[in-house]
Amino acid sequence: MSSSPSDPAYQASLSEIRSAMKKRDFTGARDQASALLERRPEDLEALYLLAASQRYLGEHRDALLTLERLLSQDSGNARGYQERGHNAAQLGDTRAACEAFRRATELNPALQASWRGQALALRAQGETGAAEHALRQFQHLQKLPPELLSAASLLYERKLHKAEQLCRTFLHKHRHHPEGMRLLALVGAELGILDDADFLLESCLALYPDFHQARFDYIGVLRKRQKFAAALEQARLLKEQQGGRQADILFATQSAMVGDYKTALATYDRVLSEAPELHGVHLQRGHTLKTIGDADAANRAYHDACRVKPDFGDAYWSLANMKTYRFGEEEIARMRELEAARSTAREDRYHLCFALGKALEDRKVFDEAFHWYEKGNALKQEECRYSIEQNRRDTDLQIAHCTRELFDKHTGAGCDAPDPIFIVGLPRAGSTLLEQILASHSQVDGTLELHNVLATARRLDGRRRASEEPRYPAVLHELEGEKLVQLGQRYLDETRTHRDGAPLFIDKMPNNFRHIGLIQLMLPNAKIIDARRHPLSCCFSGFKQLFAEGQEFTYGLQQIGEYYRDYVRLMDHWDSVLPGKVLRVHYEDVVGDLAGQVRRILDYCGLPFEADCIDFHKTERAVRTPSAEQVRQPIYRSGVAQWKHFEAELAPLKALLSAEIEAYPAG
């Protein structure tokens, strides 16, 4: 049970505990916190206050037990990890203290005490370089004005609107304060207002070109906006101005993002020759090798990451995510052991769970494989902020506002360029396969899952609190013809950097299915292909996939089933109000009749037939999705109905999707 601000008695109890602690009456605070927990045994704030009181009383082992209760419920509680670090340090467990303080600063980099504790612990372990870095972070925070320190802490606790208010108030008095500008930009980025974040950081660096942290953050914002060339230029400047290993790694990563894989790999290799213990660099090197299709070298890189950090869950999952790699008995036993170890961090644990699920599914041990998938999803879901209710509301709003009358009103409006081919749908529904087929055509460029339509929708929605009524899509009724042309042209201008000169290009962002109304208004001649897969195949494939980011609806069978239903409902709406606009391509049909479906897709796109589209697996291009290795092979049938091995476990999902399954025409 979390805090309940509307309960006056509860708030009064918390105030009394905090007051006792301020007066250094730690015994009284401990006893009051214990009494409150008798009434509310899972209350997070009461657990934190009890642990803090116990620490001040020297009851360090009791405090650690209290913190175990707290962190088992809220694994993202930065202050809880900070308390764990303090107690471990008092008990002389330097390694545990260092790990706890490190985790605290990962979750909330504004925690001064954790940086100081980390510096002391690292120094005690002889890690002087890392200790100096932690000390510099502590000293930087000490110099910050109190308002900005509070804003930073609120930012990392995801209290974004409070953080924004503090930053704006501070900048009103200190207009061009560099840290104030940087923090406000970070708040904007977290709120999805990337235009503002971009402008703020660009302005900050124009005023303070040596503010390296701002440049580092600017690269992150540019990357989110998929401005990869600009991000690389900033990374090059950071490398020249600041230098150091982190700047080199960032430069390598950005080089890979613009397709300069040779430079990226050479830089990673040089960094690893100097510091082979950097497990994250081995992982990034593996990802780069996977992207360019060198599966054997990628596997070796992932194994190197495991050797350097034996409990590195992401490396094991990256091996599993190759889809073609098969784990040996010893590796599976090792993963089980690591997942069960108390010292394994939660993030590593859920990566290991997904890897174990894949390893055991490959060995046809289906019941145990499902157990690991289910456990991994449960662990991952704890850190997600997905809301089924919000998803349904957004779907309802699209249906309510994107009417046939709206589209009739704007017939002939928008930017008339036919360049984009949008491939939409759910992840793991075959969209990468369709992209590879089309990108094998001489007149089509394959690009990425581009964020530009989503960003356009966000700009139209404007700045608002989560509790406020959305402006989008209702605002579409207010747009005039000239504005629609501008929106379409801006989309084309922003995406041009990803193209190689072909007349047409693919935007493979699956979530664009939500914004087909917007696409129709601003780019009426664009083509839209809906990649559709059998409901159980699609949902189960998403359930057993650990995504690098986003797609938070997949981490639970109930919510992925509800999401699929809303997706079908919205696509049915688009078919109704925009008849013939969307070409639906069923994955099972592509597997069953590749040549026929290729001709159908090319005809829809107005393209002449080319045999390379059937031999798509021979096309050499970078692929950055989980299906990268699969689309480099000929069509195979084994993936069509893998869910049937788990039919008993998927019975609730099958019941939820009964109408969608019955209506599904293929497979």
Image: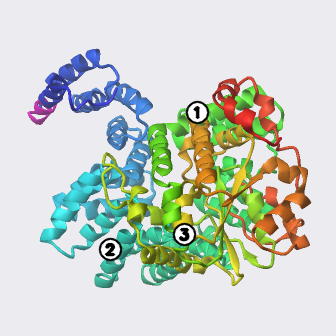
Q: Is residue 334 visible?
A: no
The residue that disc 3 covers is: 411
SS for tag 2? helix
| In this rendering, the label closer to the viewer, 3 or 2 | 3
Span shown in magenta: 18-23
Q: Tell me the amino acid under the disc marked 1.
A: Ala
SS for tag 1? loop
> In which quadrant is the N terminus drawn?
top left
Circle 2 packing at 10 Å, graded few (<14), some (14-19), many (20+), is many
| In this rendering, the label closer to the viewer, 2 or 1 | 2
Q: Compared with residue 609, is residue 365 higher up or lower down, i.e. above or below? A: above
| In this rendering, the label closer to the viewer, 3 or 1 | 3
State left or right for residue 277 relative to residue 7.
Answer: right
Circle 1 packing at 10 Å, graded few (<14), some (14-19), many (20+), is few
- CA distance separating discs 3 and 1: 62 Å
Magenta: main secondary structure: helix
Q: Nearer the viewer, residue 78 or 523?
A: 523
Q: Compared with residue 185, is residue 588 higher up or lower down, i.e. above or below? A: above
Circle 3 packing at 10 Å, graded few (<14), some (14-19), many (20+), is few
Q: Please say if the residues under marks 3 and 1 sit with CB atoms less than 8 Å apart.
A: no
SS for tag 3? loop
Identify the residue shown where x is 43% and y is 75%.
Answer: 483
Nearest to N terminus: mark 3 or mark 2: 2
State left or right for residue 470 relative to residue 610.
Answer: left
Identify the residue shown where x is 29% and y is 59%.
Answer: 138
Reply yes or no: does residue 19 show up in magenta. yes
- CA distance separating discs 3 and 2: 38 Å
Residue 133, x across and y down, in percent: 39, 63
User: Residue 164's image quarter?
Assistant: bottom left
